[in-house]
Amino acid sequence: MPSPFEYAPAPESRSIVDIRPSYGLFVNGEFVDGHGTSFKTISPATEEVLAEIAAADDADVDAAVRAARKAYDKVWSRMPGRERAKYLYRIARIIQERSRELAVLESIDNGKPIKESRDVDVPTVAAHFFYYAGWADKLGYAGFGADPQPLGVAGQVIPWNFPLLMLAWKIAPALACGNTVVLKPAETTPLTALLFAEICQQADLPPGVVNIITGAGDTGQALVAHPGIDKVAFTGSTEVGKAIARSVAGTDKRVTLELGGKAANIVFDDAPVDQAVEGIVDGIFFNQGHVCCAGSRLLVQESIADELLARLKRRMSTLRMGDPLDKNTDIGAINSGEQLARIRELSEVGDAEGAERWEVACDLPTKGFWFPPTLFTGVTQAHRIAREEVFGPVLSVLTFRTPAEAVEKANNTPYGLSAGVWTDKGSLILSMASKLRAGVVWANTFNKFDPTSPFGGYKESGYGREGGRHGLEAYIR
Amino acid sequence: MSRIDVRKTYKLYIGGAFPRSESGYSYEVTDSKGAFVANAALASRKDARDAVVAARKAFGGWSGRTAYNRAQILYRIAEVMEDRRPQFVQAVAQSEGLTASKADQAVDAAIDRLVWYAGWADKITQVVGNANPVAGPFFNLSTPEPTGVVAVLAPQGSSLLGLVSVVAPVVVTGNTVVVVSSYDRPLPAVTFAEVLATSDVPGGVVNLLTGSAATIGPWLASHMDVNAIDLTGIAGDPALATDLEVAAADNLKRVRRAPAAEPDWTLDPGTEPMTAFLETKTVWHPIGV
């Protein structure tokens, strides 16, 4: 029987966005040609080519670093903090003014649902600039010495899962502290970073303070290895993070790394079940599971496992998947064919290793990259889907009997980015929170972010914190 | 006829016990003028691995103690050192070739530094942690936690003050330590370990290896169950420091880089020696639902 509550399509208009046929690099306040092999960025929901993007070669990277150095020496490091602050406030305001345009462009280039880019990503981006703007003239009160100094030029490399938000996490604190930056967005999601470059122009930000260079991994490598940078900030895979840690060995470069995760979301038998189900769904299916802190391992207390899973499956079946620009869409497209292949491969390993797959029955669009919300039961700690980061909408379900067993299983990973705890017992929350080796613990909630709240991992999830007062430490000496 | 003195065997300190090196090796330790003083145990790779196991085993208990209790224990170390002051002055003078008054000052500074760090145990959380005013109905708190097992290459020059200055800030916050002493000047370190053994410091919290930082360092830097490494002891050897930093990347150890030259240990250390081996944990909870 068809549901009485059918949804009519409610697509957001994309006419607000003007995508140019091609984009150059943003160096020293201007768009310039790149000298590497240019590449195309596509819409992952339709595989439509959106634009031709310049790639920066070594000489382009060098030019960008020089521009940043000059801006640092001549302008930005000499500018009083209260004046730097005003530029950041301007940027925050322009992001708010152009928020719909940014949200639509982000959804087109990344594949994430418009309700998420509109209600989560872009507002948090503006808030992040607003928050760090206010620090620019108060750094002496931040607890890092009476007169903290900027580091110099920061080389920043960001991933494709939250393109604009990761840009904000990198650029806002760097600029507030008096550094200049060269930032490389991910190859598959360059467009909002390039629109941000236009925002810097509108804000009359002095040339060279922000430089955006596009390209693939070799461009990022050239940036990180450039002797003219003083600081590396990277968000991405643990594998690349380790390569960066090796490449900066023996230098004076400061480094912060925000890497992978395999978070445990732990549900006790006294948890508020409906809220927990919402939290589990939000934890793993938010942003198609392309979240480093995703709650990808559900640890559920044995006595309530059957009931919880039944409710979870029912809730998953109501998730709407499809056009990222449709305002009713909950689950958008997988960001790239490469990532889709990775998700499929690890899911097949899950089948082969004996876990039981359950997925939402839904029609997948014929074009684009799609993977339905999926969960695996009968997962053991030895299974690869319990150990490796899938970075997709795939949940591994394990059970436990005692809090000690939950802690043991949750911590049995080289990662340590985040964790979730669901129980009505306050003392249990506090004891779990103190025993979980993870940088962020969400209790009776999940996947919450705020500019004031430090974020970052233990162990192989990286080092350093982004956000909050703690986030300043990465950009001052 | 004068009495023949009873000499001490200088051993390693691992898991609260004083074993010889499992390798059976030792090396000659001389005073500052080159005269033989003793044979010290030459720690091997296996000793380093045993020490890491002991440190890991001790981590849960030590990090789980109250800050007040860790403060009491660090203060107790200072008390016991003060009690054995003449022995330390003699050992430091002999190792470093200092005059009695200079050795006096070094031991005073080492004891005072322990007292200073003891006081930090229950204050560092307040100084580096804070509540975060998030834009929503959530309680949100960031607090520091110890990184885990920390390998420390202690300075080569300052045999006691330098050693205390790199070990105390790591353990006071709840980390456990595997420390490699100065190669040429290991004896004050072994005596310090004997103080630790009688100061209510649980076994395994501090594990002391005597021997070569250049030999043992690579094993510790690449050990997958070590969470962080302090390279102070190889100051002035940038090639080795680079190698160890590369090895440390295998499990993304936190690295406190080697300085160009050994620091002046009499200066105020600030909080960085502690914060280098702390993680920030942020806990969220809804308000009102």
Image (tube, helix red, strand yellow):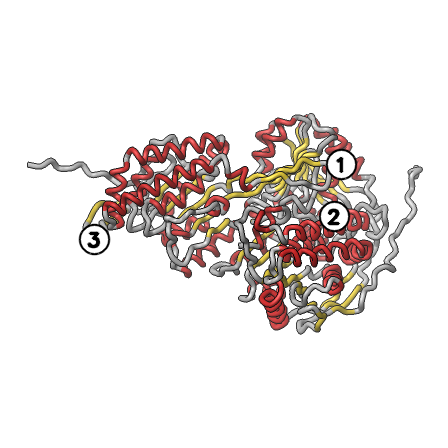
Q: Which chain is home to disc 3? A: B
Disc 3 + disc 1, Cβ < 8 Å: no
Residue A462 placement, left or right of B84 = right
Q: Gap between marks 3 and 1, in whole Å? A: 72 Å
First reached walking from the N terminus: tag 2 or tag 1: 1
Query: In the image shown, does A206 or A65 lie closer to the viewer?
Result: A206
> What is the distance, in whole Å, between disc 3 and disc 2 at their CAs?
68 Å
Label 1 chain ID: A
Q: Provide residue B21's location: percent of width, then percent of height.
A: 31, 43
**From the viewer's perspective, is B195 left or right of A111?**
left
Q: Is residue B98 above or below residue A19?
A: above
- Residue B198 in percent (x, y) is at 33, 31
Distance from the alpha carbon under mark 2 to that under mark 1: 14 Å
- State the residue position of label 2: A287
Task: Relative to A186, say whether A426 is above or below.
Answer: above
Camera-nearest residue between B138 and A415: B138
Q: Quadrant of the N terminus of chain A?
A: top right
User: Mark number for residue A278?
Assistant: 1
Under circle 2, the secondary element is helix
Which residue type carries mark 3? Gly
Q: Is residue B225 visible?
A: no
The residue singled out by tag 3 in the image is B34
Q: Is residue A117 above or below residue A47?
A: above
**What residue appears at the point 30 percent right and 41 percent down from the top-left corner?**
B190
Residue at disc 3, secondary structure: loop
